[in-house]
Amino acid sequence: MEDQSVDEFEDQYSSQVIEEEDLFFDDPSFDQDDNNHFEDGESAALFAQAVAQHNQLSTHAQDKDDEIQGQAQEVSEETLRNRLAGASAHKAGLDSLDKDRVNQIIYEASKGSAFFENEQKKDHALTKRIDEMLQRYDQIKDLDLTLEQSIVDHKIRELEESRDLTQAICHLDMDAFYASVEELDDPSLKDVPMAVGGMSMLCTSNYLARKSGVRSGMPGFIAIKLCPSLKMIPLHFPKYRAASAKVRDIFKKYDPDFLPMSLDEAYLNLTKYLTTTDLSPAEVVEQIRNEIFESTRLTASAGIAANRMIAKVCSDINKPNGQYFLPSEPEAIMEFTKNLSIRKVPGVGRVTQRVLEALGVKTCGDIYGRRALLYRLLSPISFNFMLKSYLGLGSTSLSSESSRKSMSVERTFNPISDRAALRQKVDQLSELLAQDLAKDGLRGKTVSIKLKLTSFTVRARAKTFPSYISSSKDIARIAKDLLEKELPVNIRLMGIRMSTLKPQANEDQGVKKYFSVVTNKIINDDDGNSNNYTPMKRPRPDDIESGTINDTSIDTDTEMQGTSSRPVLMDLICPICNRQLQMDNPQFNYHVDECLTKVTVKAILQEQDHQGMEVIGSGEDSNNSSTSSSCNSENGHTSNHSRKRMGTSNRQLRDKARIKSLLDYYS
DNA sequence: TACATACAC
DNA sequence: TATGGTGTATGTA
């Protein structure tokens, strides 16, 4: 694309989105459903095994001796190969022999390129990061994690109680969307391997091409090596938009507030519709898919479940042209997540997968057995996310009320390093960005530039201004300042972003936004809608219900302890205060709640303060637990639960912060 | 706030 | 010859 003008480029790539439908990592070896709920001894053993495995894979043993190094290097190519293969390389249609062949071809085709070198660098960085995490594990593995376990279990109970099973959420996903649309126009394309996109990037491929390993996100020139007869079709966005509009018309009938994620994907909340019909959820979705086919001759796949997360996972199960219904029952959901590869959870990408795998977590079910460890090793946010994945929890409302936080433009081009040319790029991009900002009536204070060097390393620089700006000139001036400090550079991409946004202080702008006011400037695109960002600003009065408590009393312990669900009084020992209690489950939960939040956490904080003071004090004395409350530590054992030494005081601070954040969560 | 990463689509 | 563009979230300093 040589010195292709920006407009031309825009035509080809604006709003281009790679279809990700087949990108899930699906290694069959993950499916083996061994040990999901192991107890702790077992857990530790499995964990050790995972650690050993990782060490084998990483270049851990390196600096020992050169020969080993060479060997390790070779093994570590494994992860890089996976990385290069793209996320979807393990997907159906290829047996393992083909898979190896495909990976080999991709590897050979990439080798030596700047892209390859950069991927290698990133891969090493990740390996190192994982090594560091495993070292942290080493330091805590001998600690008594009983308390952590209690905290986590408590949190699990809370999450379980928050489970909302009242909604019927559907995720709909068009099959090989762009490719299918192209096949409508030219049915002969159905009989040949075909992909939509260009030599540098494919957006999607038909099922014949997938058999050869050709898939979305792959550069066209590599795809051709995999499949020399591949037919490549350039993008035709107007067609895709038209098809998408038809599909959305149908969605609208079933949920006027449906949430589109892209041209080919959307979430529907069918709860309301279901009250108007005798059809089952699955039947309704069948009907929707039939209507889509009648209207467009295109097929779609769907998942129906209690929340977005699992609905999304479900839509992948029977694709193409299929659907999957997961009943909204806790048992069914737990059974479903038990063997679900963690990678299928939306939000878990290849990096997270590798990290978790190193910690012995391959499926959502695995999370439970590692919960105390994960609690220690992950950030509170990540940990919380893991628990929700384990429980199969997710958002049950489709509101997208959050306003936009940034707006940006970026372009790839033939490398430039000439200062004048660089500054010209800034001008071009600033102009585009200013237009987009104007379209949405936005101004902002923070300008960032992004530079991708020819080595593929990325640099971002930002500057925040005291006042809001929006003109291309203002943007360009700041961007040039930022650029100047980075010179000299040789880059293949430049981007400019505006953030810290604020709507233009313009009266009826809220209305104007929807009827694109004809500005003095007609912008490149004929349909006047060059980006596909629809400002979905629907007020959603119905959100309010989602806060209601569902009183379907759930036996929160069925899965974890197998205790009876009947309200029978039992002799239980509170893991926090160590007292023997006679109560039923709900009472016990309540007690643990109180105990945890009101007493023990404080005690821990104090204890840690203490330990922090005393450096590595004799650790036995901390009889500080008599913080007055309904639930005192009888023997001081719990709060004193012989932690063997913590690392640096830095770590203590972190732990403290962690527990504090947990406290916040409770309150 | 600035910057880097990870992720979705 | 050749590996995208837009946006959000998160972690860390």
Image: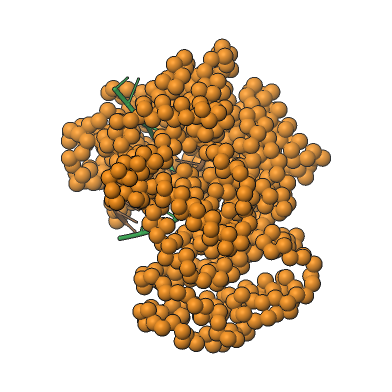
Chain colours: A orange, B brown, C green
Q: Is residue A645 left or right of residue A207?
A: left
For this rendering, which residue is in front, A186 or A241? A186
The answer to whether A146 is drawn above or below residue A78 in the figure is below
**Residue A312 x, y percent position in the rendering:** 60, 42
The answer to whether A69 is drawn above or below residue A522 in the figure is below
For this rendering, which residue is in front, A390 or A183? A390
Extreme residue toward the top, this view: A188
Instruction: Give residue A277's quadrant in the image.
Output: top right
Instruction: Please report the residue visible at 60 percent of the width from the left and 86 percent of the height from the top.
Output: A634
Instruction: Please report the residue visible at 28 percent of the width from the left and 48 percent of the height from the top.
Output: A65
The answer to whether A90 is drawn above or below residue A274 in the figure is above
Q: Is residue A555 left or right of residue A464?
A: right
**Residue A602 x, y percent position in the rendering:** 51, 79
Instruction: Please report the residue visible at 71 percent of the width from the left and 74 percent of the height from the top.
Output: A587
Instruction: Please report the residue visible at 64 percent of the width from the left and 21 percent of the height from the top.
Output: A297
Q: Is residue A486 left or right of residue A667?
A: left
Quadrant in the picture for the C terminus of chain A:
bottom right
Quadrant in the picture for the N terminus of chain A:
top left
For this rendering, which residue is in front, A426 or A301? A301
**Residue A170 x, y percent position in the rendering:** 66, 41
